[in-house]
Amino acid sequence: MRAKRLRFDRYVLDLDRGCLLLDGNEIALRPKTFAVLHYLIENAGRLVSKDDLFAAVWPNLVITDDALVQSIGELRRALGDDGPRLITTIPRRGYRFESDVSAVAAVDQFSVNAAPILAASGDEVPSPEIIVKVRTPLSFFTTASTDWRIGLFVSFTFAGLLAAGVLWSGIASDWRFLHVLGYGDRSAIKNPAIGAKPSVAVLPLVNQSDDSGREYFADGLTQDIINALGRFSALTVISWNGVFPYKGKPASPEAIGRDLAVTYLVEGSVRQIGDRVRVSAQLVDTRQGRVLWSARFDEALADVFALQDNITTQIVSALAIRVAQIEQRRVFAKPTESLEAYDYVLRARPAFQRPTRANNVEARVLLRRAIELDPNYAAAYAALAETYHIGASMGWAESPTATLSRAEELAIKALSLDHSEVRARVILARIHIFHQRYKQAEAEIERAIAINPNDAQSLAGRGNILMWLGQTDAAIEALEQAQRIDPDLNTIDRFALGLAYYLKGRYDAAIEQAELNLRESAGANFNRIVLAAAYTQQHRTEDATRVVAEIHRIDPTFDPQEFGTKFLNAADLKYLRDGLSKAGLYPAEAGATRPLK
């Protein structure tokens, strides 16, 4: 008979209750993170490859390395100082669990004194991995930064779709409340616990159009729904990158709810036939698998934005959530009068998810066309600003300063048209950081977070600023918070997280972030610099030498005197240069010591 409890070191893994215990107190873990730990423990002492873990924990799903790195990072944090010792990284191969494991009798001296923070079954208590706790009023970023994914806020057919699990209960009287048709079983819905925020995942809408080339349209609508819902402070919304692995993959709502630790799920399809759009959608309670609301819509394409109000109103009655009047106005704002301009913006979006020099230029062309069609389209200006910011950040611009100036002009133009344009504020904050104007950067990022508390790039920007200001612990907290909402952090934000880990002496974690970045963006040479410093601090001389050679080969003009000069804390800069000097990238300095963890 299989053991129900497994003891290792000072801990007990309770398989029946699905929890990790330390001295009888439960340590909160997400369901997938628990599964990763279980698999590692069952294979203690031997190398476990990433493929082994993907097959065991995420069977039949296409998952990026981010999901695994995030789970390993969560485990190490949960295990505190024991984490790096118990779970070791074998570079480019996998992980090894370093502890003896023994079975424990069903009843032993451990008793659970603390109520579980997160139940593997998907309890109504919101998951700490998703909830956005706005703790510090700081913001953003490093030398050159960008947001690879642009979440333009465009309200469309379900834009509030799940304001769905999210809305209503005291919306101001000036809001038109249309008649609710009342699909589904509303008797199953309970008011969320006081202080708990409903958590929602909007799955990629299925493209049922005859033209497979319209896939971008279905994805764009999904992204708009997610970004619209993120503006409601009473709701926690999983990012597009969090739900994308489920695109085209069969999985039950219960399984997805457990994987993402969400209570509600929106799923549906979109079909465009000529000048008409057909949308079907439903809201599901993942705990019970019950449909709470469903509807079908068949509207003229010209009415696609008006359709938002109709869908949102029908869902509004599904759950009782208070929504501020200003949030209503933001969600129901019409982004553009031109459907053709909107279509150009949707076509440009994929370039922001995995930018290359070529697709960045192509996106710029599409966005200029959108602006020609609607000169007052704020989201198009913000997206165009981002293409310039990406060009400067990735080293594609002949004159980075001039390119950033152009980005700044476009972002300011976007805000003059719509002061709630989140992407424009994030870009301005990144530009302020480039010029080391940290107060201005902080102000812009905090405005962005106030508008959309679920925007991962804004939250990551806050972490960037905290890092450069020398508040490394708070920076890591903010960046990890962003990563919980968006597991696929962009290259710059993941670089910032890796650098912050390095400053805290968490070299394994720093190496993981840098290596992951380089697998996805081989040209992002700045990651190799952190990698070289972390390798040499671990006395991995051979690996450090290899990376240093790559740095000089890719960028023969690399100037170590400039790297890291944005640090306001002299001790942080000194410690970074200590690693660089040991790696042979910087003249040796005396007196640099490892910072306290």
Image (spheres, grey):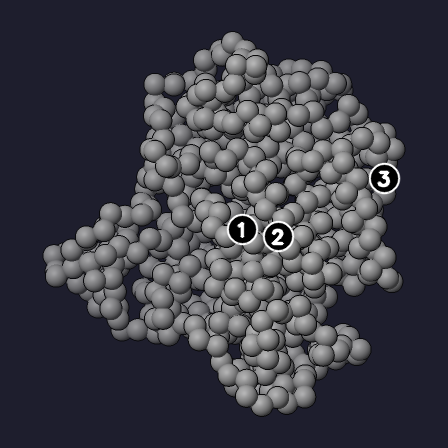
Nearer to me, 140 or 48: 140
Give the percent coordinates (x, y) of residue 465: 60, 59
User: Which is more N-terminal, label 3 or label 1?
Assistant: 1
Mark 1 and mark 3: Cα distance apart in space = 35 Å
Element type at marker 2? helix
Q: What residue is disc 1 on?
A: 137
Q: Is residue 7 left or right of residue 140?
A: left
Residue 86 location, quadrant: bottom left
Q: Which residue is drawn at 75% across and 27% down?
A: 336
Q: Residue at x 57, y 19 (%)?
A: 311
Q: Quadrant of the C terminus?
A: bottom left
User: Mark 2 and 3 residues: CB-CB less than 8 Å, in contact?
Assistant: no
Mark 2 and mark 1: Cα distance apart in space = 7 Å
Q: What residue is disc 3 on?
A: 368
User: Which is more N-terminal, label 1 or label 2?
Assistant: 1
User: Which is more N-terminal, label 3 or label 2?
Assistant: 3
User: Mark 2 and 1 residues: CB-CB less than 8 Å, in contact?
Assistant: yes
At label 3, which amino acid type do we have? Answer: Arg
Q: What residue is disc 2 on?
A: 442
Element type at marker 3? helix
At label 2, which amino acid type do we have? Answer: Glu
Q: Which residue is drawn at 62% across and 69% down?
A: 567
Q: Nearer the viewer, mark 1 or mark 3?
A: 1
